[in-house]
Image (tube, grey):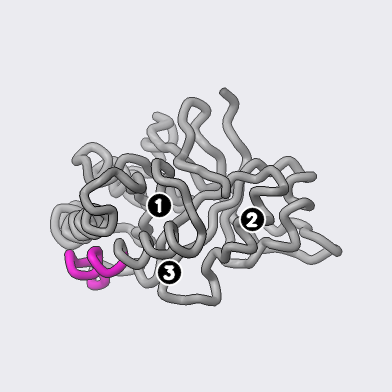
Amino acid sequence: MPALKGLDTTMELTRHAAALKAQGYDFALRYYSWNAAKNLSLGEARALSQAGLAIGAVWETSGTRAGYFSRAQGLADGAAAFRMARDVIGQPFGSAIYFAVDYDPTQADLDGAIGNYFTGVHAALYVAAEGQPSYRVGVYGSGLCCGTLVEGGAASLSWLSQSTAFAGSRQYAEQKRYDIIQLLPARILGADGIVLDVDPDATHPDRDGGLFTV
């Protein structure tokens, strides 16, 4: 199947869904977080789905430094992400929630704090779903981060950050090991001539990226 064309943004896209579809976009990645201002809403999810756009979900609040990550933080974030996905949005089980590691972590960070964080995420999802399969866990980050977590079983999907200078990212992109790849920031037109600041994205042509509709 062909790679899908998408974007991610912190901006609400409800009114822009049809305009994005008309420009050839196939999906939009939006946020779950502790910051309600940037979160995907049910109305927005429905508008995107009705326009023919698939949705991707990413949890990101403050994952920009090693000190944020711990098993306890993973438990809290995983539980909150599950509630938003299931109870607010109605995101279907089997689709993915990506968890962001939005800096250039060392291998020691990945083997320690970040690995512990993803252990917490999995435990939270397991408890919330009463031991049944629910959401696939994805990771957003560098090539080293994505590769380490996927190969170690801490994540089942990877969304490669646009930051090509991060460890392992060029090789990860060249080898097409990602499920979704983020490209350099762009400004595009939405509805009524409104300019949207977005990051373009594309799926791997042979993978579904964990996207969904409602």
Q: Tell which residue pokes out farthest to the right in this image.
A: 192
Q: Distance between the residues labelled 3 and 2?
A: 19 Å
Q: Give the range drawn in magenta.
A: 67-77
- Is residue 60 visible to us here? yes
Residue at figure coordinates x 28%, y 53% from the top left: 129
Say which quadrant the N terminus sits in: top right
Percent x, y for residue 132?
A: 26, 45
- Which residue corresponds to mark 2? 46
The reply, left or right, for residue 30 in relation to residue 144 is right
In the picture, the disc for residue 97 is 1
The reply, left or right, for residue 40 in relation to residue 76 is right
Nearer to me, 19 or 147: 19
Q: Is residue 41 magenta?
A: no
- Which residue corresponds to mark 3? 33
For the residue labelled by badge 3, is the local secondary structure a helix, a strand or a loop? loop
Percent x, y for residue 207?
A: 46, 30
Crowd around label 3: few <14 · some 14–19 · many ≥20 (10 Å): some
Q: How many labels does the image show?
A: 3
Q: Is the magenta stretch mostly helix, strand or loop?
A: helix
